[in-house]
Image (cartoon, coloured by chain):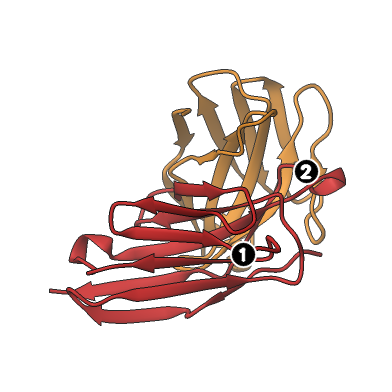
Chain colours: A red, B orange
Amino acid sequence: TQLLEQSPQFLSIQEGENLTVYCNSSSVFSSLQWYRQEPGEGPVLLVTVVTGGEVKKLKRLTFQFGDARKDSSLHITAAQPGDTGLYLCAGVGAGGTSYGKLTFGQGTILTVHP
Amino acid sequence: SAVISQKPSRDICQRGTSLTIQCQVDSQVTMMFWYRQQPGQSLTLIATANQGSEATYESGFVIDKFPISRPNLTFSTLTVSNMSPEDSSIYLCSVKNAGHSYEQYFGPGTRLTVT
């Protein structure tokens, strides 16, 4: 069974601060995705990282995939109240019975105070 | 991206009854999945809905409790049978196309409360 450990579980910060969310596993994934979810809605895909060592930027969000494709991080610069939400990392199964299946981390509830 | 709708958006049901949740996609998709999520927590995969054949269930989930149908490439249903309060959760369907696209898209979810 593939597991993803996501930390921290809760994050409460002031507007303008920086933060990093981590996602770690002992398993290798074909790719790793980050989602953001707001109450009453389904998760919305933010980014997919595929190559070991890959870094992707989405405005103030920076995503990194570990060299061994077992871990990932999400860094938010100068957080804003609009960034508030549940952030989920998800590893994409590489093959066999795991092909295409997502293994989700526990999630990080981020609250950015004005 | 695919647009996914779910019905109902929420329901309150009595113990021992069953509820069928519908998932409709605006385009044909290869793979459809059903997840369960406690509010503010992670998602757990229930099963993969296979078109024209029986669904593939994850460990801890069985067909008698969560029968799934997928009559075509745009529609699926999940039934939560003989409900108990422990079944209170958010149920989400998601879709993915095979091939080089890794993206998976989620419906808005169905919030189920069992009393």
What is the C-alpha distance between the residues marked 2 and 1? Answer: 20 Å
Q: Quadrant of residue A13?
A: bottom left
User: Which label number is shown at residue B35?
Assistant: none
Given the image, what chain letter belongs to the residue carrying mark 1? Answer: A
Residue A7 vs B46, above or below: the answer is below
Q: Is residue A38 left or right of residue B6?
A: left
Chain on which label 2 sits:
A
Residue drawn 72% across the image and 68% down it: A3
User: Of the residues under marks 2 and 1, which one precedes in the sequence?
Assistant: 1
Q: Is residue A96 left or right of residue A32?
A: right
Tell me the residue at 62%/24% (across/down): B29
Residue beneath the point at 23% across and 73% down: A112
Q: Is B41 above or below relative to B43? A: below
Mark 2 is surrounded, within 10 Å at the Cα level, by few (under 14), some (14 to 19) or many (20 or more) other residues, namely few
The number of numbered badges drawn on the structure is: 2
Given the image, on which type of amino acid does mark 2 rest?
A: Tyr
In the image, residue B18 sits, relative to residue A4, either above or below, namely: above
**Residues behind callouts 2 and 1 on a single chain:** yes
Element type at marker 2?
loop
Mark 2 vs mark 1, foreground winner is: 1
Q: Amino acid at mark 1?
A: Gly
Q: Residues within 10 Å of mark 1 (few under 14, many from 20)?
A: some
Q: Judge by depth and name the residue closer to the eye, B4 or A55.
A: A55
Say which residue label 2 marks: A99
Q: Residue A84: percent from the left, percent from the top? A: 28, 65
Residue under label 1: A66
